[in-house]
Amino acid sequence: MAIVRFPHSFSRFARGAAIGLMAAALAACASGGGLYGAIPGDNRPHSAVDRARTMPIQGIDVARYQENVDFPVARAAGIHFVFMKATEGKDYIDPNFRVNWERARDAGMPRGAYHFMTWCSLASEQAAWFVQNVPYDPSALPPVLDLEWNNHSSCKTKPNRADALEKIRLMLEVMERHTGKLPIIYTDMNFHRDILEGEYFPNAFWLRSTAAEPHERYKNRPWTFWQYTQTGVVRGVRGEVDRNVFYGNQNDWLMFLHTGCDPRALAALQASGRCLPAK
């Protein structure tokens, strides 16, 4: 076996993640399953997203519905990252956020917090609520702004495109200032079509597409994360869970952990003072 040496510029967090990736790969190979042997299944798999199940950097996103997630077990089962719901609107915090935040950190699983944007309160109020409730943590993944229409809530407001984009950009600005990292934009097909399509953002995108690959549904919008099922099955998680995949290989993932940005965009983003390596 070759000796692996990490660059001195790699953060301690990234080195730890690299060691975890190699350990998971060795364990999977020892069990006869190869690198992907530890990736669990899906209660209702769709063949159009089969490629996602073969990609090496797998993750989940959780909220209160998953109750008590056993992050060490999930990590041992091949899960490399978790995004967790933190806040919604101007006054809601997920009741499991704080315990999820601490338990994932203690398990050594890279984790990020997301804010669900609502359209019935001011963006400034929502930004202040996020800052109040999500700790500043340089070791965390970039924060996520979840952009969807609020179809399943009491808020039925749909702002026009210009108003929605103004709220979104304010929210992204405050989240970046608070965390020191360029936020990720999560969205679904309907909201992307109505508001985001054709708009430039420097942010990485996390796209929901459970019955086709993202390029088929989002007009070739580049993506960094792909949510490919909501009926995933993962050891350590009770019931069904959203499953996600990172676009790249292990080296790409380590660079993402190291900088907080998609490696494909690093040159342009670092020129603007963003995505500088963690110290």
Image: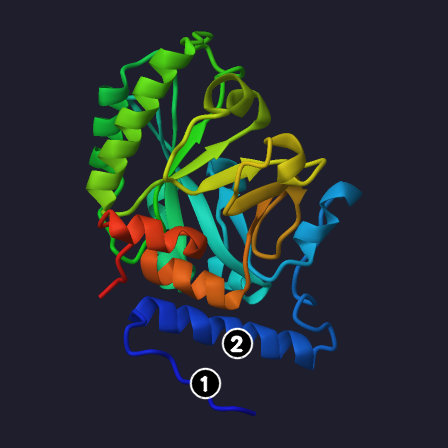
Q: Which residue does the image show at 36% across and 39% down from the upper left?
A: 202
Horizontal and vertical percent position of residue 128: 21, 28
Instruction: Evaluate if marks 2 and 1 touch, with contact meaning CB atoms under 8 Å apart.
Output: yes
Q: Quadrant of the C terminus?
A: bottom left
The vertical placement of 278 against 63, above or below, is below
Residue underneath mark 1: 4
x and y, in percent, of residue 52 in the image:
66, 51
* Amino acid at pointer 1: Val
- Looking at the rendered image, the disc whose residue lies closer to the viewer, 2 or 1, is 1
For the point 35% across and 55% down, the residue is 267
- Seen in the picture, residue 91 relative to 220 is either above or below; the reply is above
- Residue drawn 60% across the image and 31% down it: 219
Q: What is the x, y in percent for residue 147?
A: 44, 26
Can residue 59 be seen at all in this image of the molecule?
yes
Is residue 274 toward the left or the right of residue 38 in the image?
left
Q: Secondary structure at mark 1?
A: loop
Q: Nearer the viewer, residue 33 or 199?
A: 199
Query: Where residue 221 is drawn, which disc sits there?
Result: none
Counting the numbered discs, the total is 2
Residue 50, compared with residue 210, is above or below; it is: below
**Amino acid type at image mark 2:** Met
Q: In terms of sequence position, does the residue under pointer 2 or pointer 1 come before the other?
A: 1
The crowding category of the residue bearing disc 2, from other C-alpha atoms within 10 Å (few below 14, some 14 to 19, many at least 20), is few
- Residue bearing the label numbered 2: 22
In the foreground, 129 or 159: 159
In the rendered structure, the answer to whether residue 213 lies left or right of residue 226 reads right
